[in-house]
Amino acid sequence: MAGLVSIRNLRVRFDGNEALRGVDFDVARGEAVGLVGESGCGKSVTWLAALGLLPGKATITGSVMLDGHELLGAPASQLDHVRGGRIAMIFQDPASALNPVHRVGRQVTEALRLHRGMDGAAARAEARRLFDLVGIPDAGRRIEAYPHEMSGGQNQRVMIAMALAGQPELLIADEPTTALDATIQAQILDLLRRLQAETGMALVLISHDLGVVAEMCTRVGVMYGGRIIEEAAEADLFARPGHPYTQGLLAARPDMAGPRRRLEAINGGVPEPWNFPPGCAFAPRCTVMTAACDAEVPALHTIATGHRAACWRAG
Amino acid sequence: MIRFLGLRLARAMLTIVLVVTFAFVVLRMSGDPAMTIMSPEAPAEAIAAFRKAWGLDQPIWLQYLHYFGAILQGELGQSMRDGRPALVLVVERIPATLLLTVPALLLKIGLGLPAGIYAALHRNSLADRMVMAGAVAGFTVPSFVLGLLLVLLFAVQLGWLPSGGQESWRSMILPVITLGLGGAGILARFTRSAMLEVLGQPYIRTASAKGVPWALVVRGHALPNAAIPTVTIIGFMIGSLIAGAVVVESVFSWPGVGRLLVVAVANRDLAVVQCILLLVATTMVSANLIVDLLYGVLDPRLRGGGH
Ligand SMILES: Nc1ncnc2c1ncn2[C@@H]1O[C@H](COP(=O)(O)OP(=O)(O)O)[C@@H](O)[C@H]1O
Ligand SMILES: [Mg+2]
């Protein structure tokens, strides 16, 4: 598959604390790739940094290439063309992600005007079509509604319609269902899967839920402590997890099919950016750590075909 | 919406009644107008006659009832000083006051809003720090101090502008600046914090994420949201158009409502004082009502009915 986005050694500092510590990640055209890890691992920051959406106090280094063009440090005019036009992003809490004082239809037509030069009746007709496409009933009337007049699930559909408006090559969905209840979650994921198949756009699905990612994605990256610590095809990762953290995540999954068993949650918590251990970030929580783990950060290395892990013991 | 308005209107009336009552009680308890107006050496019969003529010999609750009944009939009483209707006395001073407070309001808005927006957009920059320092100075320095400083500098030292009176438009400059600077500081601070709050909201990031250029994010997404809290402050400033210049009018001997109030209080000219307070309360309350209506226009979440 042809490469679309290529992230190399991406580092982000907030007030002197390194939140991202060298992220390497690729997205190919049309693929659905998952990004998992506990909250605070740097999943959101990775893509916010790539799109230039972090606050000014963040210091960003490394490289984010889109189709061979560097995005980091690109002029705003160029980024405005990429954002929404080539890479769209939707967020965790749709209720606060939409502007409360503008009608939802207007928020979609704004993207149509920016990226497809559509105005007036044409833009409204296209917004209506997009609302139909994302499954908002009574689209003609709902485009006149304000975000507070719609449910969380409906708002997330609006966000998706807004993202589709620019006909992006890549959609970043940052925990798109975390704030929604279970039945709505499934509907939104179905919708994303269908849209991805129909439009052929690539999808990065950020989630802390391995089950969601397993269903939707062909490849998965696992993040921990501001780095990718394992990356593999979905089936490989679930069958032969190489990193103790991934093994822990898998063990902690509630098993829907089998008999209820005790969750083997990983002890301890994610290290804070101002408090990273000197070696492997996972070492303090790892059950199989050795002296080497505290001495040096293990590099991401190939442990099998198309399967990389950052653990001294894996491989 | 009708219910909401009705409720607001009832609250506004209650506020006015409370202000009027409070003023009545405080004024009656803080000294005998007969003594002030007649001078203490006046013969006892004259003072008694004065009291009788103005109803001051009656119990206070009866005076209050009479007073209230009169207000309801639009009768605001006569000045104890010159016997003219208090309302006429007050109303003829309003234009002079507005001549100061309206330009001062424009100055507050014209200076405070842009400064606050700019400071928020360039947070922690040198300009931000300067705007904020200026804003703090603007509303911590009391207006009589600022007024006197301006007089010392521009009237006494430089001799560029008159120090008081109402001879020409040039006499307006110093009082308007004195009034405007403090308010501009308050407005700048409020606008800045409202903008900072809004700029941190997820929907601002959403707008950027869909490719809206930053200038348009600010204009189309941030400002309409930041306007909602800012309107409260501006509404309050509009509410004080009549009463907000008491100190400045005194410093610059400007013949407006504020000066009339100071003189009337000193003279215990009850009808005039009460008339001014009633007017002030009414303007404040009306401004608040307008702000409430504006909220509905600016914020769809507060609009009842509709969809
Ligand atoms: N604006 C910010 N300022 C300071 N620290 C931040 C900011 N955004 C994220 N961080 C820090 O960066 C780390 C990664 O956050 P994030 O990418 O949001 O995690 P997640 O994997 O849950 O999406 C966290 O430790 C978080 O506290
Ligand atoms: Mg996140």
Image (spheres, coloured by chain):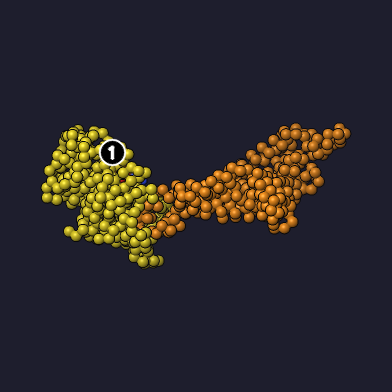
Q: Identity of the amino acid at label 1?
A: Phe
| Disc 1: residue Cβ within 8 A of ligand 1's nearest atom | no
**Neighbourhood count class around disc 1 (C-alpha, 10 Å): few under 14, some 14–19, many 20 upward:** some
Work out whether residue B247 or residue A292 is closer to the camera in this orientation and state it: A292
Confirm whether residue B33 shows in the render: yes
Relative to A216, A119 lies left or right: right
Quadrant of res A312: top left
Q: Secondary structure at mark 1?
A: loop
Figure chain in orange: B
Confirm whether residue B191 shows in the render: no
- Residue found at x 81% / y 46%: B82
- Quarter of the picture holding the C terminus of chain A: top left
Position of residue A105 relative to residue B197, above or below, is below
Work out whether residue A283 or residue B40 is closer to the camera in this orientation and state it: A283
- Residue found at x 86% / y 34%: B41
Q: Position of residue A126 (x, y in %)?
A: 34, 63
Q: Position of residue B168 (x, y in %)?
A: 72, 58
Extreme-front residue of the structure: B157
- Quarter of the picture holding the N terminus of chain A: bottom left
- Residue found at x 35% / y 60%: A75
- Disc 1: which chain? A
Work out whether residue A169 or residue A153 is closer to the camera in this orientation and state it: A169
- Residue found at x 74% / y 56%: B167
Relative to B224, B41 lies left or right: right
Q: Position of residue B240 (x, y in %)?
A: 62, 48
Figure chain in yellow: A
Identify the residue under disc 1.
Answer: A276
Q: Position of residue A151 (x, y in %)?
A: 36, 49
Quadrant of res A79: bottom left
Across the whole image, how many numbered discs are drawn on residues?
A: 1
